[in-house]
Amino acid sequence: MSNEEGEGRFDAMLLHIAQQHTEGIEQLLDTFLGFLRRKTDFFTGKGPSYAQRVLMNKFSEHQKLAEKDKDDDEMGKKSNAGPATKQPAEPDSAKIQELTDEEAERLQKDIDRSKEDQSKTKPDQVKQEMSNGDGSKGDQSKTGEAIASDDLEDMEHEASPVDAKNDDEENEEDKGKMLPNSQNGADLPDYRWTQTLAEVEVRVPLNVAIGIKSRDVIVDVSSKHIKVGVKGQPLILNGDLFNKVKTDDVYWTLENRKVIVISLDKFNKMEWWNRLVTTDPELNLKKLNIDNSKLSDLDGETRGIVEKMMYDQRQREMGLPTSDDQKKQDVLKKFMEKHPEMDFSQAKIS
């Protein structure tokens, strides 16, 4: 186990303890030192200077680590923000030029778009234009049309067993649905929620002039219901959750004494929620920013499903065929190889 993993293994428990200390870090330190004083001989067991020396050594050690982390972050930001310097081109000299990520992405889009233009094929309809010639040629074209009609019907059934809805129907279904925020949740008047496949975070701002303490807050979460508010006032959030959560893994904290932040662990980690509670407006899940999901947290099967969704989304954004469209094109290609006697040189594929 690395030092970083060892440091973090008690974070959940310590965070829960810290949430109960609403007066700040001094109150938290007072609790830890009080525990050592009451339950151990830390202050008196090895002489009066031992405890002070250990505390100062550990303080100095962690202060240096904190300063190093800060310096590393600043250097990383400068490195990312630094302008790329371009060397002047040398005439009549061949060289390899490294592309930036943006340039490489644009180049790949151009290549993919060019490939698509050259080989746009869909097995919906084959129209074969007959060229002027003798009778035998006309008979062969007729035979080709008959084969295409029969085989393409079977091929379409194999490639797409369930008829897909057209774009107009999809748009009609999505009318009135809310667009998700940048983290796949929703920004609503009284609260904001975000999600990954595994977790949901809810942020509830409190309409108070002066910061309050955690004992004045109501946070009650069961497997299918949530209540959030301030004691003596109407509840801010009260409703049935979209789906079940694990009650043992519910954590909440009072941020700056004015915002309640709640972390929920989904029971089903293979679905996106289209609303936090059943009374919320429905989200358009086709517009999710799936890249925000932590794929490393998913099992193999779920990760494969999510990666396919991400790939198809990128393909649609670039105007390229999705994985299902590519399967159909592969089936058509096999069909053409299966019937070399057919002349597809003047066929129009739509």
Image: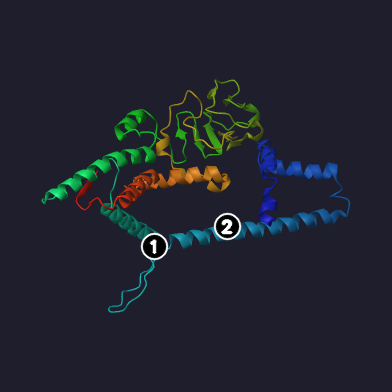
Task: Identify the residue at horizontal 15%, vertical 49% (top origin).
Answer: 136
| Position above or below: 307 against 112 | above
Residue 100: image tag: 1
Q: Estimate the x, y position of residue 275 in percent, counting from the top left.
A: 48, 29
Secondary element at image label 2: helix
* Residue ranking furthest to the front: 136
* Residue 47: image tag: none
In-front residue for pair 49/310? 310
Quarter of the figure with residue 19: top right
Could you tell me residue 261's position as x and y percent?
57, 35
Percent from the top left, x then y, of residue 82?
43, 63
Question: Does 62 sit left or right of 281 as displayed?
Answer: right
Q: Which image quarter is the N terminus in?
A: bottom right
Residue that label 2 marks = 70
- Comparing 329 with 99, the one in front is 329
102 relative position to 297: left or right = left
What whole-number distance in Å separates the C-alpha atoms at marks 1 and 2? 27 Å
Q: Earlier in the sequence, mark 1 or mark 2?
A: 2
Q: Residues within 10 Å of mark 2 (few under 14, many from 20)?
A: few
Q: Give coordinates of residue 63: x percent, y percent.
A: 66, 57
SS category of the residue bearing label 1:
loop
Depth check: 38 or 219 in front?
219
Q: Quadrant of residue 230?
A: top right
Q: Residue at x 54, y 23 (%)?
A: 240
Mark yes or no: residue 155 visible: yes
Q: Residues within 10 Å of mark 1 (few under 14, many from 20)?
A: few
- Nearer-the-camera pick, 132 or 192: 132
